[in-house]
Amino acid sequence: MPTQKINVLLADDHTVVRQGFRVLLEAEPDLAVVGEAETGRQAVELAKKLKPEVVVMDIAMPVLNGLEATRQILRDVPSTRVLILSSYNDDEYVRRLHTAGASGYLLKQSAAPDLVKAIREVKRGKTFFGAAISQRLIANYRQTVLQGAPVKRRTDLLTSREMEVLQLIAEGWVNKQIASELGLSIKTIEKHRQQLMNKLGIHDIAGLTRYAISKGVIRTPTVDAATV
């Protein structure tokens, strides 16, 4: 009886990264890459169309970042599991993605040995974190429970829609382009733009761009060349 394959969608804006992971995954008899996305928006649309068991997602995706794409995929295709691959080795990113519903988090620099195992684990409904991240999560848990350290609470100021608008502004889109991309009126975009500026206390594009970079909403030049 043939093995039932786990259908995987790859979401990364680097073609060479997607190709490398495709070769790695399709060498396994129980895995099949059913699609590739190069923007977060495309990842959401393909996930709704293909309904893969697992989406392998980069965080710093153009048009719609991996965090917002993860939220939308899990909202629209709740049976899908999202596994994050990222160049960001930061507990804050892990926390935000885990809160959004991601089932696992691997660093790109060391993902290849664990990726196949991680996909199988999250498909079974489990979570999977890279070794270095797991060690820090355990250490943070021990500090919280044993030493009574305060638990960090979510401090995200912006709504999902405001985060989408912020990303597109930071990527250089004007209101008319943003409205067309999101299927909203220009007046609605202007309202979202003003709301996010008021919430952040930032009233210029340069400041919004710096904020977006600091939150990992858009990629900085120093991490643009990701490797498999």
Image: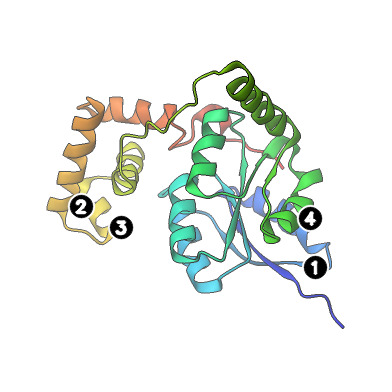
Q: Earlier in the sequence, mark 2 or mark 1?
A: 1
Q: CA distance from mark 3 to mark 4?
A: 34 Å
Q: Is residue 65 visible?
A: no
Q: CA distance from mark 1 to mark 4?
A: 12 Å
User: Residue 123 location in percent, x, y?
Assistant: 69, 61
Query: Do tag 2 and tag 3 residues touch (Cβ < 8 Å)?
Result: no
Closer to the camera in the image, 21 or 52: 52
Q: Amino acid at mark 1?
A: Asp
Image mark for residue 181: 3
Q: CA distance from mark 3 to mark 1?
A: 37 Å
Q: How busy is the neighbourhood of tag 2: few (under 14 within 10 Å), some, or many (20 plus)?
A: some
Q: What residue would you read off at disc 4?
A: 24
Q: Quadrant of residue 134?
A: top right
Q: Earlier in the sequence, mark 3 or mark 4?
A: 4
Q: Earlier in the sequence, mark 3 or mark 1?
A: 1
Closer to the camera in the image, 158 or 210: 158
Placement of the C terminus among the 4 image quadrants: top right
Residue depicted at x 78% and y 63%: 26
Q: Nearer the viewer, mark 3 or mark 1?
A: 1
Q: What residue would you read off at disc 2?
A: 176
Q: Amino acid at mark 2?
A: Lys
Q: What residue would you read off at disc 1?
A: 30
| Disc 4, SS | helix
| Disc 1, SS | loop
Q: Is residue 179 above or below residue 211?
A: below
Q: Earlier in the sequence, mark 2 or mark 4?
A: 4
Q: Is residue 216 left or right of residue 225?
A: left
User: Residue 24 location in percent, x, y?
Assistant: 79, 55
| Disc 2, SS | helix
Query: Do tag 3 and tag 4 residues touch (Cβ < 8 Å)?
Result: no
